[in-house]
């Protein structure tokens, strides 16, 4: 899964008041919630596929046929 920060950094204004920053934060949270509510099932399917692809390389690290040393 790629993230926004993996592509570029987003500069934020230094002159926002805490109230302005809170409004932007709440707007983005509301946007994320609205997107999730609209696309929940496709997003879960997409995330599941990406997680399964990431986990397949980890399975090679363990040999489950090793004898238990105790």
Image (cartoon, grey):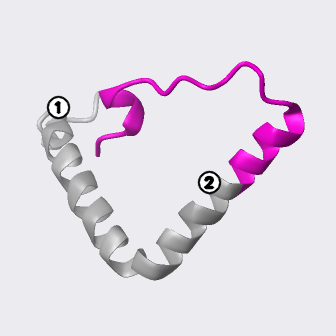
Marks 2 and 1, Cα distance to the nearest angstrom?
39 Å
Where is 42 relative to 16, above or below? below
The residue lying furthest to the top in this view is: 14
Label 1 residue SS: loop
Residue 43 pos. (x, y %)? 35, 69
Q: Is residue 60 magenta?
A: no
x 17%, y 42%: residue: 59
34 left or right of 5 in image: right
Asked if one can make out residue 39 in the rendered structure from this viewpoint, the answer is yes
In-front residue for pair 33/22? 22
Instruction: Provide the residue span drawn in magenta.
Output: 1-26
Label 2 residue SS: helix
Q: Which of marks 2 and 1 is nearer the N terminus?
A: 2
Residue 22 pos. (x, y %)? 80, 44
Where is 28 relative to 58, above or below? below
x 27%, y 53%: residue: 51
Residue 50 pos. (x, y %)? 23, 54
Give the residue at mark 2.
28
Give the residue at mark 1.
61
Q: Residues within 10 Å of mark 1 (few under 14, many from 20)?
A: few
Residue 36 pos. (x, y %)? 49, 71
Where is 39 relative to 69, above or below? below
In-front residue for pair 28/50? 28
């Amino acid at each position: 899964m790629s993230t926004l920060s993996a592509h570029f950094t987003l500069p934020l204004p230094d002159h926002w008041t805490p109230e302005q920053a809170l409004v932007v934060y709440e707007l983005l949270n509301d946007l994320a919630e609205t997107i999730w509510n609209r696309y929940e099932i496709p997003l879960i399917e997409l995330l599941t596929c990406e997680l399964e692809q990431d986990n397949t390389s980890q399975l090679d690290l363990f040999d489950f046929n090793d004898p238990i040393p105790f």
